[in-house]
């Protein structure tokens, strides 16, 4: 049996039981159904309108690499209110477990239970009354680095800025590591994903995405790092996992120049299984 | 795919093949330059430690840098934060900026955007452009400070007295969310600050 089959067997057993439930407002059948979908395709993990992109990207890594651990974690959270992934202890507070998820949150129960729990266990201030997008609740790189290390990932490389853009060589290194088999998360401003906003220059990062293909860069500036000049003929293309699916950047077949890429790019975290 | 597209694609691939290794080499070179054997000589590191223990703010910051980057010594964010704090409390603007980043990220200190903003502010008042830009970022998001686009614009503008292209574009993005009167107000406040602090605005 494959890891995915093992994971699904755990879900089958979970669905047959009727108790316990540590989350009074979540339903077992809905969580079980969501688990199956994500075991089949981890890209289905989707933070919806919450600011849980950091936990979403991390959880996708676990679901992809260790589907059985992913299923067990969600099941244990549901039934006992706590779990561990490697050395990462996930113990959401009572308030979170009792929170009634609003319809506007746009997040599935199976994702909410683990993504919000990871964030809650990080001791980060979290407004339980509003799952709506809140840039101030973005996962900081050091937290994400720590989750990966505790979960058992090796060779974790954190080359990010929390307050200033990174340059093209940084992005090329991220791409090179991806090609070498590392899992790579990019720290960006979501402007980059929007056809309308991709040429806006951001002041801060607000989103995590996972690289799903090497980054293609055509630019004179690749050989001249450290400048913020624009090569008008430059072109940067990438593909990332974001908000529950794989998306092309730039969207809609447009051209993204090196300058506008860099102005919404804040570095990467890479790791090995 | 037509001929034009094929030509574009070909030049795209050729450029990437030619330029990517060069950039990587450049990147690796700059990393190796940061870690020259001499700067990690035990006697040199010991001297920094002694100077830091004796109360030198610059040595404290330098030692914190070593721990933060895992350069010459094992990476230790807690020790880095401790030395940054000692240096920052003596008024070293770079240490204040770095300590602000530690609080922003929660690097072995409690994640605390309000403390981050406070340390960024102290460095910003000493003309640390990185801290000024960072403080502008916090005001734009309302992290650790109340959301205030006028103050965000003002600090970002102050961070680049010569008004480089990146800053100009960031200000344009901020201005889209502000009224003309707010932009005007922020421009005036920034110009006053720049002149008062002996910098030349463009």
Image: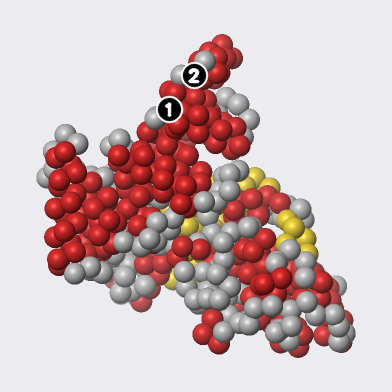
Q: Is residue B127 above or below residue A147?
A: above
Q: In the image, residue B187 lies at what x, y percent?
A: 16, 54
Which mark, residue A50?
A: none
Q: Chain of mark 2?
A: B
Question: Is label 2 in a helix, a strand or a loop?
Answer: loop
The residue carrying mark 2 is B55
Q: For the point 29% across and 56% down, which residue is it?
A: B152
The residue carrying mark 1 is B90
The tag earlier along the polypeptide, 2 or 1, is: 2
Q: For the point 74% across and 83% down, which residue is it?
A: A24
Q: Is residue B162 above or below residue A99?
A: above
Furthest residue to the top? B43
Q: Residues within 10 Å of mark 1 (few under 14, many from 20)?
A: some
User: In the picture, residue B173 is in which quadrant?
Assistant: bottom left
Q: Is residue B162 left or right of residue B20?
A: left
Q: For the point 66% across and 72% down, which residue is it?
A: A96
**How are the residues colored?**
secondary structure
Q: In the image, residue A118 lies at what x, y percent?
A: 66, 64
Q: Is there CB contact under 8 Å for labels 2 and 1?
A: yes
User: In the picture, residue B171 is in which quadrant?
Assistant: bottom left
* Residue A215 can be seen in this image: no
> Quarter holding the N terminus of chain A?
bottom right
Residue A125 vs residue A194, the one in the foreground = A125
Q: How many marks?
A: 2
* Residue A134 can be seen in this image: yes
Q: In the image, residue A74 lies at what x, y percent?
A: 74, 72
Question: Is label 1 in a helix, a strand or a loop?
Answer: loop
Q: Is residue B129 left or right of residue A129?
A: left
């Amino acid at each position: 049996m494959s890891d995915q089959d093992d994971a699904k067997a755990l879900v089958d057993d979970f669905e047959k039981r009727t108790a316990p439930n540590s989350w009074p407002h979540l339903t077992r059948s809905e969580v079980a159904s969501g688990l199956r979908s994500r075991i089949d395709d981890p890209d289905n993990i989707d933070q919806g309108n919450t600011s849980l992109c950091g936990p979403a990207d991390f959880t996708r890594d676990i679901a992809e690499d260790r589907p059985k651990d992913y299923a067990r974690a969600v099941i244990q959270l549901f039934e006992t209110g706590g779990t561990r992934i490697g050395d990462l202890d996930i113990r959401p507070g009572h308030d979170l477990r009792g929170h009634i998820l609003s319809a506007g949150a746009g997040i599935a129960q199976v994702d909410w239970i683990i993504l919000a729990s990871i964030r809650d266990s990080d001791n980060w201030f979290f407004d339980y009354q509003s799952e709506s997008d809140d840039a101030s609740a973005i996962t900081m790189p050091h937290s994400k680095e720590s989750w990966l290390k505790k979960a058992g990932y090796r060779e974790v490389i954190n080359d990010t800025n929390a307050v200033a853009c990174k340059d093209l060589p940084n992005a090329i290194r991220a791409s090179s590591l991806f090609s070498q088999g590392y899992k790579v998360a990019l720290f960006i401003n979501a402007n980059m994903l929007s056809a309308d906003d991709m040429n806006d220059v951001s002041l801060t990062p607000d989103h995590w995405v996972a690289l799903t293909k090497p980054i293609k860069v055509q630019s004179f500036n690749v050989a001249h790092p450290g400048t913020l000049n624009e090569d008008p003929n430059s072109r940067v293309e990438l593909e990332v996992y974001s908000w529950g699916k794989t998306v092309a950047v730039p969207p809609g077949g447009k051209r993204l120049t090196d300058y506008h890429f860099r102005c919404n790019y804040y570095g990467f975290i890479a790791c090995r299984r | 795919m037509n001929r034009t597209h094929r030509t574009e694609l070909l030049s795209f691939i050729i450029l990437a093949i030619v330029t990517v290794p060069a950039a990587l080499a450049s990147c690796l070179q700059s990393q190796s330059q940061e870690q020259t054997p001499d700067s990690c000589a035990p006697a040199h590191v010991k001297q920094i430690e002694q100077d830091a223990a004796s109360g030198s703010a610059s040595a404290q910051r330098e030692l914190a840098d070593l721990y933060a980057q895992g350069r010459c010594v094992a990476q230790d964010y807690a020790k880095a934060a401790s030395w940054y704090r000692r240096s920052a409390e003596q008024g070293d603007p770079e240490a204040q900026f770095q300590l602000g980043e530690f609080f922003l990220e929660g690097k072995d200190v409690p994640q605390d955007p309000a403390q981050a903003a406070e340390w960024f502010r102290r460095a910003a008042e000493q003309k640390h452009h990185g801290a000024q830009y960072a403080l502008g970022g916090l005001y734009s998001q309302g992290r650790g400070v109340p959301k205030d686009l006028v103050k965000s614009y003002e600090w970002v503008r102050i961070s680049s007295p010569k008004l480089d292209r990146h800053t100009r574009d960031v200000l344009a993005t901020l201005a889209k969310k502000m009224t003309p009167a707010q932009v005007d107000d922020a421009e005036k406040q920034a110009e006053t600050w720049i002149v008062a602090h002996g910098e030349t605005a463009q």
